[in-house]
Image: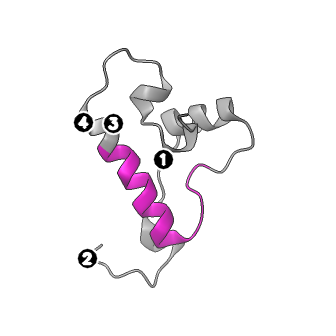
Amino acid sequence: MVTPYYMSPEQAGGEAKLTPASDIFSLGVVAWELLCGQQLFATKHPLQTMKAVMHSEIPEIRKVRPDVPAGI
C-alpha cells in the first residue's frame, strides 16, 4: 500500500511514468521528517495530502529546527 505522505508530486498527480527521481523525493521527505521530528505533509485526508505534495513549498529544515547543522 502506498501512503500519499511519501508520494512524489508526479506520483500524486497521476503521471504514468515515474522515474528514480520520484524515489529520491520520497527519501528526502523521510530524511526531512527524521531531522525535523514532525510530518512534512500533515493533513487528515489522503486527497488533501496529495494536493499538499503537489503544491506546497517545503520549509527549509533550519527554519523548523535551527539546531540542525548547516551542512545538512
Q: Residues within 10 Å of mark 3 (few under 14, many from 20)?
A: some
Mark 4 or 2, closer to the camera: 4
Q: Do residues under tags 3 and 2 come within 8 Å of each other at their CB atoms?
A: no
Name the residue carrying label 2.
Answer: 71
Residue at 30 percent of width and 46 percent of height: 24
Q: Which residue is mark 3?
A: 22
Task: Decide: few, some or many residues near mark 2? Use Cα within 10 Å; few <14, some 14-19, many ≥20.
Answer: few
Amino acid marked by disc 3: Ser
First of labels 4, 2 by sequence position: 4
Question: Could you tell me if the residues under marks 4 and 3 are in contact, i.e. CB atoms within 8 Å?
Answer: yes
Ranked by sequence position, the earlier of labels 3 and 1 is: 3
Point out the stretch of residues depicted in magenta.
24-41
Whether residue 42 sits left or right of residue 69 in the image: it is right
The reply to whether the magenta stretch includes residue 56 is no
Q: Is residue 28 left or right of residue 59?
A: left
Residue at point 49%, 44% (across, down): 6
Residues at marks 4 and 2, CA–CA distance in whole angstroms = 24 Å
Q: How many marks?
A: 4
Residue that appears at 58% across and 32% down: 50
Q: For marks 3 and 1, give the one nearer the viewer.
A: 3
Q: Secondary structure at mark 3?
A: helix
